[in-house]
Image (tube, rainbow, N blue to C red):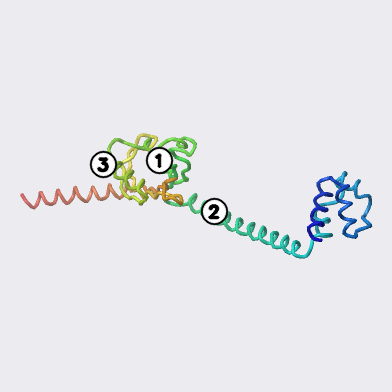
Amino acid sequence: GGAIGVLATLAVILGTGILGVVLLRRMGVRRWPGDPLRAAASGGMTMLAALLLILPGFLTDALGLLLLEMWRHQVRMARTLERFQVLGAALHSSPVGVIITDAQGHIDWVNPQFERNTGYSLQEVRGRKPGLLASGQTPLTTYREMWATVLSGQSWSGQFINRRSDGSVYYDEATLLPVLDKKGRCMAIVGLQQDVTARIQVQEQLRQRETQLQELLEQ
């Protein structure tokens, strides 16, 4: 029956040709292309040919379903890879600085805009922590609040006063997004950073002019 056919096929494929021939002959198969023992020993009989010859119909259907599922899996993987490629292109060309770290804050990747904002290349910052940008002018309470919020699984937005590689100071408006695993644990952090120095400077100039105008009116 079907079980004997499966055993015969496996026996021939695995090289135990004598057992395979005996079982095949019990099924009534008297003629075989070439010498089955020699074919088994030399590997001349392919697995696919043997399966198509003696597998019963339901196993052939199962094999077809397996191949169909493998094809569908490849299609899903191709679509997922395409989405990642689109996302990667978007992050790479983003006008906002992007920084990705592990859960401990070690930098894994930054985009070109981050490099332009800070003056540091990806090679220079990879494996280091964003603290290398610290100017000493950002309040410590800002960092404490940031870490407490992100590690609790929530996004955080705020402002840093950072220092570029050339020593110049700039204002960095940041949003940090934790990436959580299935258990809700933080496994990575994505940071979006925008240099808002020009805006801050304009606001400061306006504030100074308002102060001067107020002093003139009070005289």
Question: What secondary structure is found at the residue carrying circle 1?
Answer: helix
Labelled pair 1, 3 in contact (Cβ < 8 Å): no
Q: Label 3, on which residue?
A: 141
Q: Label 2, on which residue?
A: 84
Label whose residue precedes the other's in the sequence (2 or 1):
2
Q: Position of residue 55 (x, y in %)?
A: 80, 60
Q: Is residue 166 above or below residue 172?
A: above
Tell me: 126 left or right of 138: right
- Cα–Cα span, label 1 and label 3: 23 Å
Label whose residue precedes the other's in the sequence (2 or 3):
2
Front: mark 2 or 1: 2
Tell me: 56 left or right of 69: right
Question: What secondary structure is found at the residue carrying circle 3?
Answer: helix
Tell me: 22 left or right of 164: right
Q: Position of residue 145 (x, y in %)?
A: 29, 45
Residue nearer the viewer, 101 or 92: 101
* Amino acid at dot 3: Thr
Q: Residue at x 14, y 48 (%)?
A: 212
Q: Position of residue 34 (x, y in %)?
A: 94, 52
Q: Residue at x 93, y 54 (%)?
A: 33
* Amino acid at dot 2: Phe
Q: Residues within 10 Å of mark 1 (few under 14, many from 20)?
A: many
Label whose residue precedes the other's in the sequence (1 or 3):
1
Q: Residue 118 has which mark?
A: 1
Residue nearer the viewer, 211 or 113: 113
Residue nearer the viewer, 64 or 28: 28
Q: Position of residue 148 (x, y in %)?
A: 32, 45
